[in-house]
Image: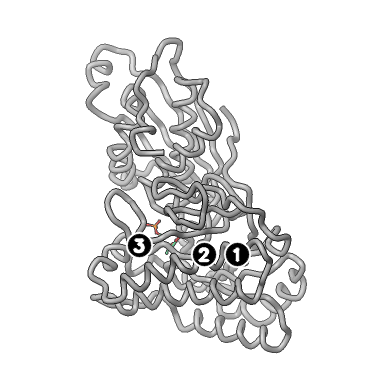
């Protein structure tokens, strides 16, 4: 599919007045990382992620057709919306949402015909350092698609999901991997059938049982605001001395992990996933200007994990996002021993001993309409 396939051309506002949708949309954790992009949010390399379950954003969109004369005159010129986060009106969130609406305007032109109220909340603590942009933008894109579906009820589910992912991508790249689950690929890749730069697709091959219900315990090492945003981080890949090699490495890792996910080869999985996490952070450390998002406790945890794996032959491993928190990944069959290890050895390195137990999820769900 190409961009123009996502432009809604004909629609009727007849019989539509007002309504409400709520979408519960999970976060995701990349196994092969996206770091570096071209306009408009086109990834420099393919990425693949586990969709999470317990870490999600709940977003409600209330819509009302503009109907008085001045409103109607305004229709084709502006977006009218209010935004609430965890019960509080958040005017400081408006510019980000306005930019998103502007970017998606040509694909969803009906948005300007409505007054919108967006209400959002996260299941995870606000300051936890868990990126809420993936689940937040994913949830908003899905609400917008539910509105489109009321204007165009014959739309197929496949188109709905593709376009939701396409719109989410324009809000935040990784958000396009939060619409469905359990494993999503984003970025055109010759070894992944149906893959696209424009939206995320479900990993199209049979996933080995070893990865069913894979666990992700997120250790909250540093709950503060990140010193360098991912927007800046992506930009710094433009003149990065190792950019070309990094994009090649990631695309090679997609070919490798695709086989591993089908064969169930856990040692090979661990090697790819940990190398990807460290390569992502190596890019940050070798950018100009350089920066480090890991904290001393991030490294202590990594060393503990390596020690435990060597001693026990466990298949525990780690990955990192653009921050100091550590995602501890392990098969469901090792839940008990790994949880004991986490509690006895790793929790001490978390801020206020905080961590979140999560696992692979199936994707976003519509709560009401
Ligand atoms: O979606 P963004 O622009 O916040 O970028 C996210 C990048 C990483 O989380 C570091 C990696 C990834 O693929 O999710």
Disc number at residue 38? none
| Residue drawn 40% across the image and 75% down it | 281
Element on which disc 2 rests: helix
Disc number at residue 255? 2
Disc number at residue 259? 1
Instruction: Judge: label 3 CB < 8 Å from ligand 1.
Output: yes
Decide if residue 194 is on the left or right side of residue 73.
right
Instruction: Judge: label 1 CB < 8 Å from ligand 1.
Output: no
Q: Is residue 312 above or below residue 126?
A: below
The one nearer the camera, 239 or 305, is: 239
Q: Is residue 343 visible?
A: no
Q: Earlier in the sequence, mark 3 or mark 1?
A: 3
Mark 2 to mark 1: distance in Å? 7 Å
Q: Position of residue 362 (x, y in %)?
A: 63, 48
Element on which disc 3 rests: helix
Q: Are marks 2 and 1 in contact (CB under 8 Å)?
A: yes
Q: Position of residue 320 (x, y in %)?
A: 49, 70
Disc number at residue 230? 3
Mark 2 to mark 3: distance in Å? 25 Å
Specify few, some or many for label 1: CA neighbours under 10 Å numbering under 14, 14-19, or 20 or more. Answer: some
Which image quarter: residue 100? Answer: top left
Q: Earlier in the sequence, mark 2 or mark 3?
A: 3
């Amino acid at each position: 599919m190409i961009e123009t396939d996502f432009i809604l051309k004909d629609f009727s506002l007849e019989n539509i007045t007002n309504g409400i949708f709520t979408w519960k949309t999970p976060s995701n954790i990349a196994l092969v990382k996206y770091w570096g992009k071209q306009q408009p949010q086109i990834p420099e390399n393919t990425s693949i992620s586990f969709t999470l379950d317990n870490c999600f954003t709940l977003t409600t969109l209330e819509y009302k057709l503009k109907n008085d004369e001045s409103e109607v005159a305004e229709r084709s010129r502006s977006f009218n919306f209010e935004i609430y986060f965890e019960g509080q009106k958040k005017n400081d969130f408006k510019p980000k949402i306005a930019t998103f609406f502007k970017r998606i305007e040509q694909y969803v032109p009906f948005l300007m015909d409505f007054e919108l109220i967006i209400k959002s909340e996260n299941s995870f603590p606000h300051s936890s350092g868990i990126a809420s942009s993936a689940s937040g933008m994913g949830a908003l894109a899905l609400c917008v698609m539910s509105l489109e579906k009321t204007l165009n009820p014959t739309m197929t589910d496949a188109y709905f999901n593709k376009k939701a992912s396409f719109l989410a991508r324009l809000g935040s790249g990784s958000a396009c991997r939060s619409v469905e689950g359990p494993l999503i690929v984003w970025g055109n890749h010759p070894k992944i059938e149906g893959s696209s730069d424009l939206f995320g697709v479900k990993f199209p091959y049979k996933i080995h049982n070893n990865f069913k219900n894979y666990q992700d315990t997120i250790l909250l090492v540093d709950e503060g605001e990140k010193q360098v945003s991912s927007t800046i981080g992506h930009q710094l890949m433009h003149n990065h001395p190792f950019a070309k090699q990094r994009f090649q490495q990631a695309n090679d890792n997609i070919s490798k992990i695709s086989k591993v996910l089908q064969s169930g080869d856990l040692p090979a999985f661990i090697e790819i996933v940990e190398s990807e996490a460290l390569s992502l952070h190596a890019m940050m450390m070798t950018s100009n200007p350089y920066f480090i998002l890991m904290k001393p406790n991030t490294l202590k945890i990594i060393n503990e994990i390596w020690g435990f794996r060597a001693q026990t032959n466990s298949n525990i491993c780690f990955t990192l996002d653009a921050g100091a928190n550590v995602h501890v990944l392990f098969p469901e069959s090792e839940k008990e021993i790994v949880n004991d290890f986490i509690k006895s050895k790793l929790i001490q390195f978390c801020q206020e001993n905080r961590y979140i137990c999560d696992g692979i999820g199936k994707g976003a769900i519509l709560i009401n309409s």
